[in-house]
Image (tube, rainbow, N blue to C red):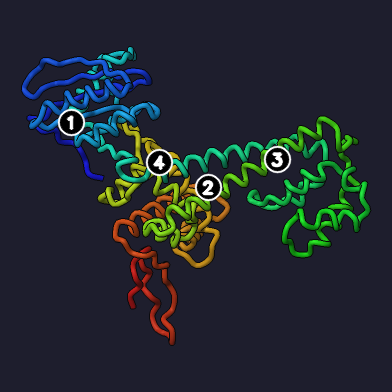
Amino acid sequence: MTRSDTTPMTAVLVAIDVAKSCNEVLIEMPGSRRRRRLTVANTRVEHDRFVAELQALAPRPVIVGFEPTGHYHRPLTWRLVQAGFDTRLISSVALARTREALHNGWDKNDPKDAQVILHMLQIGATKPYHDPLANRINDVQELSVTHEVISRAKTEVQHRILTHYLPLYFPEIERFRGNTRSDWFFAMLEQFPVPASITALGKDAFVAAAWDVVGRKVSKSRLLGDIWETARTSIALPIAPDAPAIGMFRLVLGEARRLIAQRDDIEVAAIKLLGEHADFRRLQQVPGIGPIHALTILAEAGDLRRFRHHRQFLKFCGLDLSTYQSGQYRGKTKLSKRGNARLRRTLWMAAQVAIRQRENSFRDKFDRYVARDRHDPDLRRKAFTAITAKMGRVVHAIIKRGDDYRPFVEGPVPGGGTPLTPCREGASATL
């Protein structure tokens, strides 16, 4: 990522403390200690007036710094980016630490924050701001965030079904549940929520009634027969299928099915939106990365080419190593986790999938890492972390270079001879 650690001496510095209804602004002209204070309300008229005032300062360069506050900064910063101003991001953690150091206390208010932001602009403690709308990733971000929200809601509803409703009304049916993406299990429960609704029919009648509900299954007759036998010997509470409690059960089952359908619709929309996107297709070539992981990486990181080195990308993800050291004391080296949590989690999950696949460099590195003791939990945790960092390096490399992913190759040369030299991810093997 290009650093914005230099502030021209001739630049006009504009510090904005963002809030929901109005923003505190502090403007400092070059070569002057006098500062102008403004309050800019979040209205179209006020934004227009503020942009016009900054444009009137031309031809001097204008550098605008702000601390992101929720999403309230997005409308104003979009206007500033479109007007051509140099916009820079102030880390919330860095702002808090700097405020405590400058004012020797924890006191916080908007005018004081604007002063601290101005100070951080002067010393270059800023980051470049990449507006999602200007960089054409706003739609990708909305798809990614909405998919996560719906996935979390779906997981919560499914846990409620598994831990509350099924233990009461049909405990034994849980063993027939497949993966969390399947809809047939909840569709069948919605139609047959209690054992009595199943045993009220004969075995053959139940198989015929549920035949279309469970979809396409291998050995469907045997599966439905097993469900009927399970219902016949169930220990469920004797609740009538038309009881109000079962009505609530059906209501929650319908919510689970609705969330599954919404998630599937978002995944289809993501593939439709990014299907021809070169980076989206290239990311899915990496073991462990599917459409949703690729979507999340693009949504959270934007264009990975803006990171000049993979270490910058790993730091952005919070996968860089940090060590606390003071005097003779030196703490453990561990992940900083001072980065994008969603991106870090996505890379971690992709790494988990990759090491369970066969014949890829992620699996090979993991096996070599835990070869000393495969059951040591601390060693396995370190191995998972190392694989996650490797996933980040590979993702950055293939996007940065614009190359397709080429799998790890290691083994004997056909016909005998010396082994192939192990190659880096994304690089070709050499004899």
Q: Name which residue lies at 81% across and 42% down.
A: 193
Front label number (1 vs 3): 3
Residue lying farthest to the left in this orientation: 31
From the image, tell me which residue sits under label 2: 266
Query: Between 58 and 313, which is closer to the camera in this rendering?
Result: 58
Name the residue: 27% across, 37% down. Answer: 129
Label 1–label 3 contact, CB within 8 A: no
Q: Would you say 351 lies left or right of 303 here? A: right
Instruction: Give the image location of residue 410, x and y in percent.
Output: 42, 72
* Residue toward you, 65 or 369: 65
Q: CA distance from mark 1 to mark 3?
A: 52 Å
What is the three-letter code of the residue carrying label 2?
A: Ile
Is 171 left or right of 315, judged from the image as shown? right
The amino acid type of the residue labelled 3 equals Gly
- Is the C-beta separation of discs 4 and 2 under 8 Å? no
Answer above or below: position of 288 versus 44: below
Q: Which residue type carries mark 1? A: Ile
Q: Disc 3 on helix, strand or loop?
A: helix
Please tell me the numbered disc located at residue 335.
4
Between the C-alphas of marks 1 and 4, the distance is: 33 Å
Find the distance from the CA under tag 2 to the CA under tag 3: 18 Å
Q: How far from the left and from the top, in percent, is residue 208?
A: 85, 57
Secondary element type, mark 2: helix
| Residue on which the image places disc 3 | 254
| Residue nearest the observer in this picture, 85 or 42 | 42
Residue farthest to the front, as pictured: 45
- Asked if the residues shown at circle 2 and circle 1 are in contact, with their CB atoms under 8 angstroms apart, the answer is no
Q: Does dot 4 land on a helix, a strand or a loop?
A: strand
Mark sitting on residue 63: 1
Closer to the camera, 103 or 211? Answer: 211
Q: How many marks?
A: 4
